[in-house]
Amino acid sequence: MALRLGDDAPNFTADTTEGRIDFHQWLGNSWGILFSHPADFTPVCTTELGAVANMKGEFEKRGVKCIAVSVDPLSAHIGWISDINETQRCTMNFPIIADPTRAVATLYDMIHPNADTTFTVRSVFVIGPDRKVKLTLTYPAATGRNFHEILRVIDSLQLTARFKVATPANWENGQDCIITPAVKDAEIPALFPKGSRQVKPYLRYTPQPNR
Ligand code: BEZ
């Protein structure tokens, strides 16, 4: 069955380009992003891995570890990394799981047979320090992901885990947040000392609490 929000992120052991890992041990107490690629030596995947390698500092700032998975063997991943480094002007700096038996792809339901019977779709799982699934995204093979959007979502996930706020449509880090409906008006001054504004009784904004 597909993994849903709030589910435990299943553990596995696997060979990666940075050695064999136990996934939960590798995550430790960090946030994590596990994302799949249809196949090695394919153009969109090459750009995606290069993009994440070049953005690794942004993930690190947020305490997020990145790991990719593809159903090709380790030898193919190793050969592909030099192409990624050359064409995307990066140095690969996070592991790619070798999943030739499709064990990880099956565990995380990354093969969608009506899209392709062999290769994974472009799945993204954001996993919290409690090892629960916080976000899932699924893109088709022909559409590369926007990793700036994934960073934006991580900013929202981390913020809303700490404060009683939600983030509105198209929110960007630093912008006003919505006070969650469970917060009573009387609680607002203590919870949100930066102030608040009420547009409707159910639509109340506050400056981003951690800025
Ligand atoms: C790609 O990564 O470029 C790709 C992979 C499978 C199908 C289409 C594109």
Image: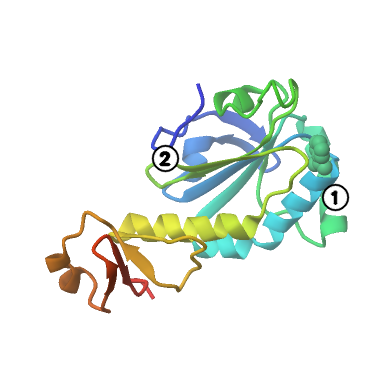
Point 59% across, 49% down: residue:
66
Count of marks placed on residues: 2
On screen, 88 above or below 23?
Answer: below
Direction left: furthest residue? 186
How far across and down, in percent of the image, does residue 65 sit? 55, 51
Query: What amino acid is at disc 1?
Result: Ser
Q: Is mark 2 within 8 Å of ligand 1?
A: no
Which callout, 1 or 2, points at the residue further toward the start of the chain?
Answer: 1
Report the front residue among 116 and 61. Answer: 116
Q: Quadrant of residue 42?
A: top right
The residue pinned by badge 2 equals 131
Q: Is residue 147 visible?
A: yes
Ligand 1 visible in quadrant: top right
How far across and down, in percent of the image, does residue 122 sit? 67, 39
Q: Quadrant of residue 99?
A: top right
Query: What amino acid is at disc 2?
Result: Arg
On-image quarter of the C terminus? bottom left
How far across and down, in percent of the image, does residue 149 sit? 59, 57
Report the front residue among 42 and 177. Answer: 177
State left or right for residue 186 relative to residue 198.
Answer: left
Report the front residue among 92 and 203. Answer: 203
Label 1, residues with CA under 10 Å away: few <14, some 14-19, many ≥20 = some
How far apart are labels 1 and 2 at the CA level?
A: 32 Å
Point 20% across, 68% down: residue:
191
On screen, 151 above or below 211?
Answer: above
State left or right for residue 186 relative to residue 119.
Answer: left
Q: Secondary structure at mark 1?
A: helix
Question: In the image, which disc is placed on residue 82?
Answer: 1
Q: Is residue 78 visible?
A: no
Report the front residue among 17 and 159. Answer: 159
Point 20% across, 59% down: residue:
183
On screen, 159 above or below 145?
Answer: below
